[in-house]
Image (cartoon, rainbow, N blue to C red):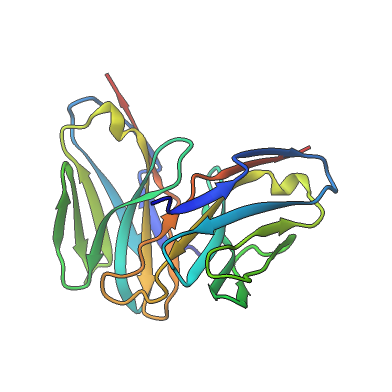
Amino acid sequence: KNQVEQSPQSLIILEGKNCTLQCNYTVSPFSNLRWYKQDTGRGPVSLTIMTFSENTKSNGRYTATLDADTKQSSLHITASQLSDSASYICVVASGNNRLAFGKGNQVVVIP
Amino acid sequence: NAGVTQTPKFQVLKTGQSMTLQCAQDMNHEYMSWYRQDPGMGLRLIHYSVGAGITDQGEVPNGYNVSRSTTEDFPLRLLSAAPSQTSVYFCASRQTRLAGGAGELFFGEGSRLTVL
């Protein structure tokens, strides 16, 4: 049973528009949550990290939120660019030193 | 700073052949790991190591062997390749502890393996 579920599986957005990706998890005990960006043909790279006490964190046009009570996180992309076309992977770290991976949100930005 | 280096980037094997995927990191990370990534399956852990001389199985270890003789290197061996092992393989390293803000995974660029 996957402990990290991401939605939508894929989406297509117009350049300049905003979008929000969702990550729901059941991992317990919770340590932190990271969003990774994986460009086609490359390895994933960390975008943001959310710890238990953090609600919102921004990295340029990327804003991550965390609701530890409902065990949900979102990644909002503002004013999308063609370079935002990628897979976004949610990874949750547990208190017993293990990582649980979501299957990713595939984002395609079209001009 | 090279980070995590994987070789080769591409490889084609015939069923039954053996090969080794190489992985090296220069960040002095104790934890190293191998993942495979298949369409619709996400990243799945094959084997991992928490230090030199220590290895353990992940979620999908069958058909793969690993060893960790140094902190820097963590090769992945396919003893007898099967078509089911066609995949993209990623090596990753991180700090051992995950508490607080620690534990960022640093990935290599991937090795695309095709088994005919």
Q: Residue at x 51, y 50 (%)?
A: B5
Residue A102 seen in the current view: no
The x and y percentages for residue B91 are 53, 55
Can you name the residue that lies furthest to the right here? B16
Q: How many callouts does the rendering have?
A: 0
The x and y percentages for residue A82 are 28, 27
Q: Nearer the viewer, residue B72 or A22?
A: B72
The x and y percentages for residue A87 are 39, 41
Vertical side of A43 occupied by A73: above or below: below
Q: Image check: B87 left or right of B103?
A: right
Q: Residue at x 31, y 77 (%)?
A: B99
Q: Image check: A14 left or right of A11?
A: left
Residue A94 seen in the current view: yes
The x and y percentages for residue B72 are 53, 64
Q: Residue at x 83, y 47 (%)?
A: B17
Q: Nearer the viewer, residue A13 or B71?
A: B71
Instruction: Give residue B28's quadrant in the image.
Output: bottom left
